[in-house]
Image (spheres, helix red, strand yellow):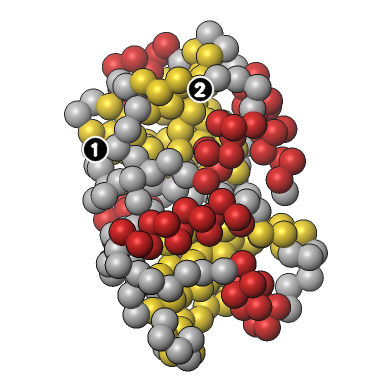
Amino acid sequence: MENILLKKSYHVKDLKNVKFNSLWGYNGVFTTIRISGKKPNLVLIGQHLKKLNKDSNFFGISFKISKQFLIDFINTNSKIKNYDHLLRVAVTKKLISLSLRKRNKEEKNFTAHIYRYQRTLPSFKNLQYKKILSLQKKINLQKEEILFYNKSKILEGSTTNLIFVKNNQLFIPKNSYYFGITLSYLTKTIPYKIKKIDILISDFYEYSEILLVGSGKGVVSISSIDQLNWYRSSLKMYKSILKEYSKVL
């Protein structure tokens, strides 16, 4: 699935380099930061670290990740000249793990599947992801996403948040999912109000567009969901929101 170009793990207590551990399944949190350009530019880094360090407190993690720590990691270990990459930062009480991989470019005809599942402690980007990783192995993430639902209500994608469009109005699920950094940025910057509602599977036919937003995918328009016989009928909001997102790259 992931072609990891660089990976390192460190002890929290002394930052000593140790054998790499992805930390999937551990008691902790993570975030995925997009990196672009030659400098490199850590996209929305302030928001990422504020959320990561705040959520770390819930798991009893006292260590705080800083921007300089991540910049030093990249400058010391990477020889990449021009970035379009993803930096995953995971932390537990004992370990910090960093991994860098090339960002995959999504195909134009991007489809989705629905699957009944709700993450453990969904409001946190926690490391209990083994179920999700097993599901992702069955699809091509460059052209497919899995949309999770519970009790007939749509929640989030396996790597993304969701924005639904109906009559030029924007809607997102009401609760029980992780409110990601990209979604948070867009809700504050796009010239449209976004309303939180329960989005039912049975009501999908009402929506002209379904957008995926996240650090890895940026902004993607779903073309179809075969299980629901749903097909997009517009790209209007997608083009507008993508233009706003592109400003941070």
The amino acid pointed to by label 1 is Arg
Q: Is residue 3 above or below residue 179?
A: below
Query: Nearest the camera: 218 or 58?
Result: 58
Secondary element type, mark 2: strand
Cα distance in 3D space between marks 2 and 1: 25 Å
Query: Nearest the camera: 14 or 148?
Result: 14
- The percent position of residue 122, horizontal first and vertical second, equals 30, 46
Q: Nearer the viewer, mark 2 or mark 1?
A: 2
Q: Is residue 213 above or below residue 126?
A: above
For residue 93, side relative to residue 33 (left or right): left
Q: Residue at x 51, y 81 (%)?
A: 8
The amino acid pointed to by label 2 is Ile
Q: Residue at x 44, y 48 (%)?
A: 159
Residue lying furthest left: 151
Count the labels in the image.
Answer: 2
What residue sits right under mark 1 in the picture? 116
Where is residue 113, by image quadrant?
top left
What residue sits right under mark 2 in the picture? 194
